[in-house]
Image: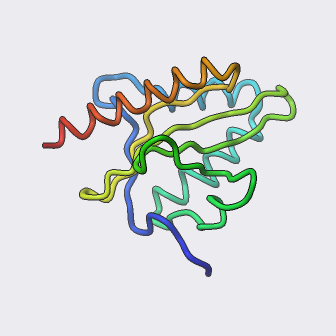
Amino acid sequence: MGLVLWLGYSIYFYDEEDGRDYVGDFIDSLARQDGRVAAEIMNLLFRRLSNGEGIPVEWTKGSQPKVKTLSNRDIFEYRGRSSKLRKEIRVYFGVHRPSKTIVFVEASFKTSDAEQKRHIEVAESRFRAYIKRRR
């Protein structure tokens, strides 16, 4: 096995305890529209991380990485694509290193650059709120 990021980390879906599940609701909706891609995200990303397996470093490399670091070093973007829907998929998550937790905070279809920027800002805000609650 090659190098792995976030080995032994757990996952958390932001605001699940409040009855809201931003990422889960998006994946449920995606599953109704393109079950293959939703299953791919569930198996490749969520299952690996929830089992503590981490993700391969190769996912972060190349000109079109599956996982991209965003504005600060703690927010990441998983990149998927639905050929059936002809849409790009983004799943945003933060990495809380002190608690070894991957926090899924936002998911959406990529539309415009402005809309994507708004989703990134929402992801950053939710992750900051998560960290603040953990102090």
Q: Position of residue 72 (x, y in %)?
A: 42, 44
**Count of numbered labels shown in the rendering:** 0
Considering only vertical position in the picture, is 95 above or below 33?
below
From the viewer's perspective, tell me whether residue 103 is left or right of residue 27.
left
Q: Where is residue 134 in the image (x, y as percent from the top left)?
A: 18, 42
Residue at the image position 39 percent from the left and 51 percent from the top:
95
Which quadrant of the view contains residue 57?
bottom right
Which quadrant of the view contains residue 130?
top left
Q: Where is residue 90 in the image (x, y as percent from the top left)?
A: 62, 35
Q: In which quarter of the image is the C terminus?
A: top left
Residue at the image position 29 percent from the left and 30 percent from the top:
17
Q: Quadrant of the N terminus?
A: bottom right
From the viewer's perspective, tell me whether residue 30 is left or right of residue 99.
right
Residue nearest the observer in this picture, 116 or 91: 116
Farthest residue, direction left: 135
Residue at the image position 52 percent from the left and 24 percent from the top:
119
From the viewer's perspective, tell me whether residue 56 is left or right of residue 64.
left
Residue at the image position 37 percent from the left and 56 percent from the top:
10
Q: Which colour scheme is used?
A: rainbow
Residue nearest the observer in this picture, 5 or 112: 112
From the viewer's perspective, tell me whether residue 87 is left or right of residue 112.
right
Farthest residue, direction bottom: 1
Residue nearest the observer in this picture, 69 or 25: 69
Q: Position of residue 107 (x, y in %)?
A: 55, 30
